[in-house]
Amino acid sequence: MPDSKLPRKAIFNPELRRKGIYILPNLFTTAALFSGFFAIVMAMQGNFERAAVAIFVAMVLDGLDGRVARMTRTQSAFGAEYDSLSDMVSFGAAPSLVMYEWALKDLGRLGWIAAFIYCAGAALRLARFNTTLEVMDKRYFQGLPSPAAAALVAGFIWVAIDSGMAGADLSILAALTTIFAGVTMITNVRYYSFKDINLRKSVPFVAIAGIALVFALLALRPEVTLFGVFVIYALSGYVLAGVRLARRKSSAAE
């Protein structure tokens, strides 16, 4: 019988059986998933620049689905699970496979191990995020977020290609970057989440000037600007951790 696979509560509750899923936020999630899949296909065809750009597109779309769901009040458990699975493809499998095809496969065993470290780091990062969501401080992420790690890997590829460098020439640096991104995702290093920023509040003039400067740099050299931003963000967690450690040691010595 078709109803035999439904939960018992759904069988006897017509409202639950008729309840579907919200299309608008899941449309953005599906688009992000497609971008991640497209990046893998482009890497298989040897078009690594398009693959890197597709990962950045997935990152933008991933940032929109949750906000759209909150704005339209269409959050759901299905949407949360679907978003997590989409993230694993777009920010876990896609960056590791693109980097492997571009630079790491020439390293033999070290190459696929580096790619696997990144992929496993993304999976563990997403699992930890999903299980600690209710108790974690919303102002900070524990470990480097997977979209930022993916941007770090994709930005490295994009900048290198735009500079005329081949993956084989940067294989060791590519492996170190991939391992750094993968390991940083599962550390306890805290990263500012920007979730407490209120866009309805007034800001100083210098903030608007800074935003204008970022747009100008994006128009001039988007690959360098994006890669630079995420390198700074990836290092910021370690810098802040070092500052906090130094303060604790200073307080203990007094």
Image (cartoon, rainbow, N blue to C red):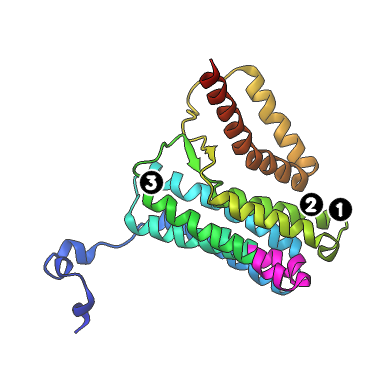
Residue drawn at point x = 38 percent, y = 57 percent: 79
Location of residue 177 in the rendering, given as x and y in whole percent from the top left corner: 71, 54
Q: Of helix, strand and loop, which one carries label 2?
A: helix
Residue occupied by mark 1: 163
Callout in the foreground (3, 1): 3
* Residue 175 falls left or right of residue 60: right
* Residue 120 falls left or right of residue 139: right
Residue drawn at point x = 52 percent, y = 47 percent: 63
Q: Nearer the viewer, residue 236 or 162?
A: 236
Location of residue 54 in the rendering, given as x and y in whole percent from the top left corner: 65, 59
Can residue 35 be seen in the rendering of this structure? no
Distance from disc 1 to disc 2, alpha carbons, whole Å, reads 6 Å
Residue drawn at point x = 33 percent, y = 56 percent: 77
Q: Looking at numbered disc 3 in the image, what kind of residue is underneath it?
A: Leu
Q: Is residue 160 above or below residue 207?
A: below
Furthest residue in direction bottom, as rendered:
1
Can residue 156 be seen in the rendering of this structure? yes
Callout in the foreground (2, 3): 3
Q: Is residue 76 magenta?
A: no
* Residue 80 falls left or right of residue 93: left
Q: Which residues are magenta?
A: 96-114
Q: Residue 212's quadrant in the figure?
A: top right
Q: Which mark is residue 131?
A: none
Q: Nearer the viewer, residue 106 or 84?
A: 106
Residue occupied by mark 3: 133
Which secondary structure type mostly characterizes the magenta part of the structure? helix
Q: Of helix, strand and loop, which one carries label 3?
A: loop
Furthest residue in direction left, as rendered:
12
Residue occupied by mark 2: 159
